[in-house]
Image (cartoon, rainbow, N blue to C red):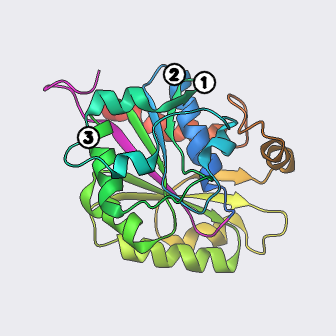
Amino acid sequence: MPGGNNSPLARVIVVVGARGGAGASSLAVAIAQSSAHEGKRVVLLDADELGGGIDLVLGAEGHRGVQWSELAAVDGDLPSQSLFDALAVHRGVRFLSCSRDADTSISPELLIRVIHALRESCDLIVLDCPRRDECLLAVVATVQCEVLIVVPNEVRAVAAASVWLSRCARFTVAMSSVVVELPTGGLSVRATKKPLGVPSVGTVHYCLATAQELDRGSGVRSGKNPWTSVCSDVLDQDKQRVA
């Protein structure tokens, strides 16, 4: 178990969308659920203050745990195991969601403190990151992590993703893309991937039924869902690191 002197720190995967509604939150949830299903100790962090709350994507509305505002009030280091135990949990995934009832302000410093603390008590941290320079760049500059950028097959999404990738390029961080093929998208999958200049983890076909399930409050379905093959590839990379 992570946390011991000879144990590796948790893997950190940062998921960010090229644009709003790209599917980054759904992918973050799917990765977390897939890893938890394998018996891993997983934490899902919601850093998108205006994203509506990752608990809705999990189908875990009403689950209670520690809040970002409470963590901001703690001076100094955060106790790792106590923080892990205080998080809300749903289907094996520990999560910290942004509140819809109170002002949630997540500074880059707080986000990094939380990540560093939790890395000692779990196997995987999945961060649903907003498209804000100060948060994303602070994390990739400070935390050993991997960045997955979710890119719909649209010209503007590709252009936006290229900007994000160029800003992250000066840091030593592994970056890869996930293409979402929309029925209304104007680009082919190949034309979407090529300008990004980073490896592609896979392609996901937009699924209206999954979007409708989210609106009904069911969350991203565990097991078989449009993100299954991507999750498998992402988590297989973790197995290769351990081997």
In the picture, measured across the screen, residue 74 lies left or right of residue 50, that is left
**Residue picked out by circle 1:** 91
Q: Residue at x 56, y 46 (%)?
A: 28
Occupied quadrant, residue 210? top right
Circle 2 sits in a helix, a strand or a loop, which is it?
Answer: loop
**Residue picked out by circle 3:** 78
Q: CA distance from mark 1 to mark 2?
A: 12 Å
In the picture, measured across the screen, residue 242 lies left or right of residue 20, that is left
Amino acid type at circle 2 is Glu
Query: Compared to 150, does 59 lie above or below?
Result: above
Earlier in the chain: of badge 1 and badge 3, it is 3
Q: Main secondary structure of the magenta part?
A: loop
Q: Residue at x 35, y 40 (%)?
A: 11
* Neighbours of disc 1 within 10 Å: few (<14), some (14-19), many (20+): few
Q: Which residues are magenta?
A: 1-20
**Residue picked out by circle 2:** 38
Query: Compared to 71, does 158 lie above or below?
Result: below
Earlier in the chain: of badge 2 and badge 3, it is 2
